[in-house]
Amino acid sequence: MTRREQRWGTARMEDGGRVAYALTGSGPLLLVVPGWLSHLELGWAIPSERTFHEALSSGRTLVRYDRPGCGLSDPYDGPRTMALELATIGAVTEALGADRFDLLGWSLGAAVAAQWSATRPETVSRLVLYGGWPTGAAIGDDDSRRLLIGLLGSHWGLGSDLLTDLFAPDTDAGTRRALAQYQRAASSADTAVALLRLAYDLDVRSALARIVAPTLVLHRRGDRAAPVAQGRMLAAAIPGAALIELEGRSHLPAVGDAEAVVDRIRRFLGLPRLRRAVPTSLTPRQTEVAALVAEGLTNREVAERLGISERSAESHLERIRLRLGFRSRAQVAAWYVATGPSR
């Protein structure tokens, strides 16, 4: 599978705020409505997330964006509403000049994508909903929701750790730490709380019957953040929707058996199955070099620290860049810091 680079763009909201978006691949548009939090640049440095999005970019122009107040988009401290979510999609698609596209929404983004598809049916060719729910009130009980919101507001670090354990139980502890750090870098605690409240408040049940686009609903049977019963309810309420239940417990689509998620989406979109992605793990020596690059050492300093020649240090760095699909030392350093490999 070909390594891809992100192409950047900016959309303008009615209040003048800028929304950052990134494009990868080529072909008809596939717009991704993000889940809870996102950061286009830092997410690209996490191997599992990058591989997942690269796989969806083969045969499609994948469009991802950071909603207001998240990632690379401008700060936003106004109310979090469905209207704002829909306006964000509208701003991004207007900036792209996109009249019709495929739409993928996951988690919180699934409810938003469903509402957009019901409100603007002429724009959606095919709809994919992953890990979603028709009403946020069905996610947990009142006590658990209050507890989680309170924890996020009072201790963003501990709250993000807890949510990461909930979202990605099928991955190792190091990756969960990296994902928790990623969430904290993607937004402030106030934004995280406001978006979680929005997820609990959204109710799209009345809109589902108006969706006319061919729809695929994907849900992992053991999803701990959004019970599979919610996916079944989504599929049952959307005319003609197909439901596929996948194995696994992780709520994040790029974690766990992400290949199964990609395969189902690509098949639904009429795209061929991909060969297995190029591995992104490094050898022990390459990991040592990446760690020293992240410390800011030059090739000569890396060589001195490891007792190798400067030429060998340069070769190791070049192999790291090729394996990870990066073009600069800065990207290698960002990847190492974001993923937190064992030292």
Image (cartoon, grey):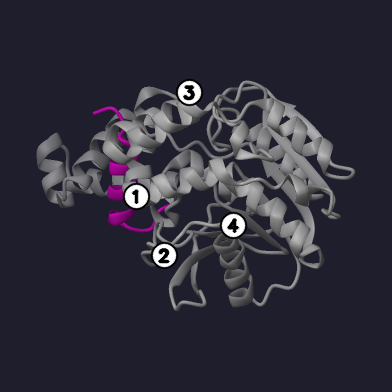
Give the CA separation, mark 1 to mark 3: 25 Å
Tag count in the figure?
4
Vertical relation: 189 (above or below) 9: above
What residue do we see at 79% from left, 54% from top? 126
Q: Which residue is label 3 attached to?
A: 169
> Which one is in front, 329 or 90?
90
Give amino acid for label 3: Pro
Magenta-colored stretch includes residue 33 = no
Residue 250 visible, this angle: yes
Q: Which residue is label 1 attached to?
A: 190
Q: Which residue is label 2 attached to?
A: 73
Give amino acid for label 2: Ser
Q: Are marks 4 and 2 in contact (CB under 8 Å)?
A: no
Give the CA separation, mark 3 to mark 4: 29 Å
Give amino acid for label 1: Asp
Label 1 Cα crowd, 10 Å radius (few <14 / some 14-19 / many 20+)? some
Q: Nearer the viewer, mark 4 or mark 2?
A: 4
SS for callout 2: loop
> Which one is in front, 87 or 222?
87
- In the picture as drawn, the residue positioned furthest to the front comes out as 142
Mark number, residue 82: 4
Give the CA separation, mark 3 to mark 2: 29 Å
Give amino acid for label 4: Met
Mark found first going from the N terminus, 4 or 2: 2
Mark found first going from the N terminus, 3 or 2: 2
What residue do we see at 46% from left, 25% from top? 143
What residue do we see at 59% from left, 62% from top? 83
> Which one is in front, 3 or 254?
254
SS for callout 3: loop
The magenta segment: 325-343
